[in-house]
Amino acid sequence: MVLRFTLVRLSFVLAVSLGIVFFAFFGIEMAANSSSERPSYNPLPPAHQALTQTARYLSRLVQGDWGTMLVPRGRQTRSVTVGSVLGDAYPKSIILIVLALIVAGGVGIPIGVFAALNRYKPLSLGTMTWTLLGISLPSFSVAALLQLAEITWYRAFGFALLPSGGFGWDAHLVIPSLVLAARPLAYLARIAYLTFDEILDQDYMRTARAKGLLKGMILRAHAYPNAWAPLLTGLSISLRFALGSLPVVEYFLGWYSTPRWSSSGLCWALTCWVRGCGASFARLA
């Protein structure tokens, strides 16, 4: 069952990846065709060219040739291999995600547990309200707020607490990690709250309390072991949130890594796609 699920997911990922590659080439071909002197608005020739280029790209990819890309260096650009860029950028993104998940799990889960243990108090309601705000707030808004807070601090006291942007293996990690951990932290806090809220109402918990066991002993023996499964599931879903926010966070905070180059290439491909499709639709209209 697990093997079948894994194969289905991998097949879906491969199909989506092939579709992205094909439509990127297709958009480039349509853009080039629309800017020629005598453009043809028949989509079949660009589709055939895109299919040929996709097959050529896959054959080179199997041989280990990832192609080249233009990397800006000041006011100039230079051509480098995609493999070297990925090898340099992926560790930076992975470390940032790992730090964000550590922060999210180490802070969000205790907050949710605390709110569940005090669920009939106003503090619990306020905590869960803030977590809802944390889930709803976009990552770029959190980044802008933290940068604004840092700038305000610098203007008020004359020195910076943390770097507000840029790359570095020192204090530069703090703000990107906090921004990237915002949504996973809020999500894990809510998952922890709902999990412990349900566990605390179970019959075995009431039986343990009726026997006069200490609260800490009840939690260690019955609540914590039964909460690990949903919390680990929530942590895996939080990874999806972190990956979705990673390009935005790194773009706004100037963190040099994979999503920045990927998003630049994607924007260029989408621009070509929109130009080609727009010209075709205008011609048909």
Image (spheres, rainbow, N blue to C red):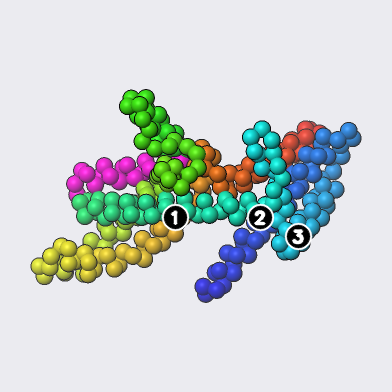
Marks 2/1: CA distance?
22 Å
The number of discs equals 3
Which residue range is magenta in the image? 120-139
Residue for badge 2: 83
Q: Confirm whether residue 206 shows in the render.
A: no
| Percent of width and height locating residue 208 | 16, 69
Q: Secondary structure at mark 2?
A: helix
Which numbered mark, 2 or 1, is in the foreground of this view?
A: 2
Marks 1/3: CA distance?
32 Å
Instruction: Using a 10 Å C-alpha cutoff, classify the residue at mark 1 as few (fewer than 14 neighbours), some (14 to 19) or many (20 or more).
Output: some
The vertical placement of 37 against 136, above or below, is above
Looking at the image, tell me whether mark 2 or mark 1 is earlier in sequence order: 2
Q: What amino acid type is highlighted by mark number 3?
A: Arg
Instruction: Report whether 59 appears left or right of 147.
Output: right
Which numbered mark, 2 or 3, is in the foreground of this view?
A: 2
Q: Is residue 138 magenta?
A: yes
Residue at 27 percent of width and 65 percent of height: 224
The vertical placement of 47 against 149, above or below, is below
| Percent of width and height locating residue 131 | 34, 45
